[in-house]
Amino acid sequence: MPRISTVLGQVDTSKLGFTLVHEHVLISSAGLKDVYPEFIPRESAIKEGVRRLREAKSEGVTTIVDLTTMDLGRDIRVIEAASRQSGVNIICATGTWLEIPRAFRTAEPDDIASLYVREIEQGIEGTGIRAGVIKVAHDVGGVTEPGEIILRAAARAHKKTRVPIITHTWAPERVGEQQIRVLEHEEVDPNRVCIGHSNDTTDLDYLTGLLKRGVWVGLDRYPTHRPDVPDWQARTRVLRALMEAGWTDRLLLSHDDPMTMLIAPKAVFAERIKRNPDHICFIKRRVLPYLRELGASEDELRRLVVDNPRRFFEGAQ
Ligand SMILES: [Zn+2]
């Protein structure tokens, strides 16, 4: 039976169940929790995380992937507490987001990769809690020079550990294509890569092009209220179109809706919560029913939210 690292230890992949592949319990900035701990509302973040996770669990969600990296202020003990108190499995991440540490920008990819490998094989910050996924992020402007260093580091850590990679992209600029180019150069099996945030576009040519190259596609932003990206209904129609084109078994869903977030102004974050009272239940409450309306079967829906994440983590074809 294949097993995967969660923050509470190894779990059979068959136990993952309904899995959201890109979420965050708490987002802040690197170093704050150690140097200025009083700046981080740890207790309320745990409380809010547990509340959200219990709510999701009561509606059938059994696992989330928390893609918070060091440069997003990852606090592994907060994630661990949220999982323990809610009963939801959490797979945590190594890797790097957009706030690439200045010292990484002049480092060798292999030297960064060995840090990721340590977090996967031994644990994070001396806790013994092991990362089960590698995150890497590129946004507007694509894969920059420092961005390429962390992408190659992610590729090499993956090749050493077989732990899969989930990316952050800016789909309107087709950044996924740039990531794949580098990953192919590093000879990474595309079946172990999910090109994330791909539902910030409705460009079916772009999305189908990614899928044809053998990667998984993350439709992992739901809902969103930015005027410059598709709304949730448009996202869901694109999802349904991809299913109808035969790609049901290559798609991964999630919200990317942080439970506590310190990197946005308080008022902006409060507005975000107000606009999405369903939070990480949004897919269950809104997207799946809309997919049913668009003709999806129960079998297809189960494949999307249960079978696909399991197969992705197992590395099954
Ligand atoms: Zn995210």
Image (cartoon, rainbow, N blue to C red):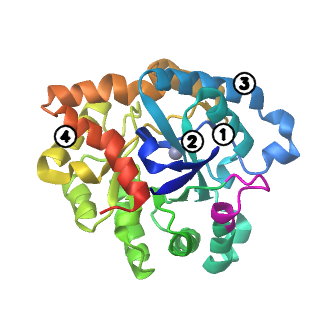
Q: Earlier in the sequence, mark 1 or mark 4?
A: 1
Q: Which residue was labeled with disc 2?
A: 90
**Amino acid type, residue under disc 3 in the picture:** Ser
Mark 4 highlights which residue? Answer: 240
Q: Mark 3 points at which residue?
A: 44
The crowding category of the residue bearing disc 3, from other C-alpha atoms within 10 Å (few below 14, some 14 to 19, many at least 20), is few
Q: Quick check: can you spot residue 157?
A: yes
From mark 1 to mark 4, how far is it between C-alphas? 33 Å
For the residue pair 256 and 18, the one nearer the viewer reads as: 18
1 vs 4, front mark: 1
Mark 1 near mark 2, Cβ–Cβ under 8 Å? yes
Point out residue 197 in the picture as x, y percentages from the top left corner.
40, 49
Residue 206, how many percent across, how many down? 25, 58
Q: Name the residue under label 1.
A: 79
Counting residues from the start of the chain, the first of labels 3 and 4 encountered is 3
User: Between marks 3 and 4, how big is the CA–CA gap?
Assistant: 38 Å
Q: Are marks 1 and 3 in contact (CB under 8 Å)?
A: no
Which callout, 1 or 3, points at the residue further toward the start of the chain?
A: 3
Q: In this view, does 50 lie to the left or right of 253?
A: right
Amino acid found under the numbered disc labelled 4: Arg
